Image (spheres, rainbow, N blue to C red):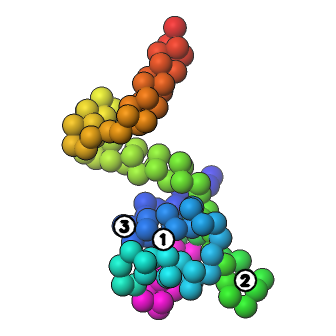
């Protein structure tokens, strides 16, 4: 039985976002990307990546001198895990309450609304 990695913290999610967008990267590359957003130290990123490796959130390629890190799970799988946990903990398992709260708290772009309508149409088509 394979166990899913634990939910990432906010800082770990920021690092995962860099890796999902850029692909496998060294500590320096991740740190430079994060530094563009806010001050972030190299040793902080290194320590977080070491912890993330132990937790099973990333894998480390040690074939080169500068190790490269890559996410273990795709973005969609991690998002599904986080949303599922939030759905259970905050919304009592109610998908409609989660969606209604999400859509009422932040305005969706026209492109997002089109994708939401497409998804609803797909779900409706499956039920017929």
Q: Residues within 10 Å of mark 3 (few under 14, many from 20)?
A: few
Image quarter for residue 88?
Answer: top left
Q: Which residues are magenta?
A: 41-53
Image position of 107 (left or right of 43) = left
Rounded to the nearest whole Å, what is the CA distance between mark 2 and mark 3? 26 Å
Magenta residue check for 42: yes
Rounded to the nearest whole Å, what is the CA distance between mark 1 and mark 2? 19 Å
Q: Residues within 10 Å of mark 2 (few under 14, many from 20)?
A: few
> Which mark identifies residue 10?
3
Secondary structure at badge 2 equals loop
User: Which mark sits nearer the N-terminus, 1 or 3?
Assistant: 3
Q: Nearer the viewer, residue 68 or 37?
A: 37
Q: Main secondary structure of the magenta part?
A: helix
Q: Is residue 89 visible?
A: yes
Secondary structure at badge 1 equals helix
Q: Is residue 51 visible?
A: no
Q: Nearer the viewer, residue 25 or 8?
A: 25
Q: Which residue is mark 2?
A: 62
Q: Position of residue 87 (x, y in %)?
A: 33, 42
Secondary structure at badge 3 equals helix
Q: Position of residue 13 (x, y in %)?
A: 44, 65
Q: Residues within 10 Å of mark 1 (few under 14, many from 20)?
A: many
Rounded to the nearest whole Å, what is the CA distance between mark 1 and mark 3? 9 Å
Q: Which residue is mark 1?
A: 15
Q: Residue at x 49, y 82 (%)?
A: 31
């Amino acid at each position: 039985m394979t166990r899913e990695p634990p939910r990432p913290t906010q800082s770990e999610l920021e690092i995962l976002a860099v890796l999902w967008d850029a692909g496998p990267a060294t500590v320096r590359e991740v740190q430079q990307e994060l530094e563009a957003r806010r001050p972030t130290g190299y040793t902080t990123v290194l320590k977080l990546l070491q912890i993330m490796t132990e937790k099973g959130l990333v894998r480390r390629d040690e074939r080169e001198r500068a190790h490269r890190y890559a996410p273990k799970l795709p973005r969609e799988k991690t998002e599904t895990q986080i949303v599922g946990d939030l759905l259970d903990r905050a919304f009592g398992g109610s998908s409609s309450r989660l969606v209604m709260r999400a859509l009422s708290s932040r305005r969706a772009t026209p492109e997002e609304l089109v994708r939401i309508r497409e998804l609803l149409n797909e779900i409706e088509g499956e039920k017929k």
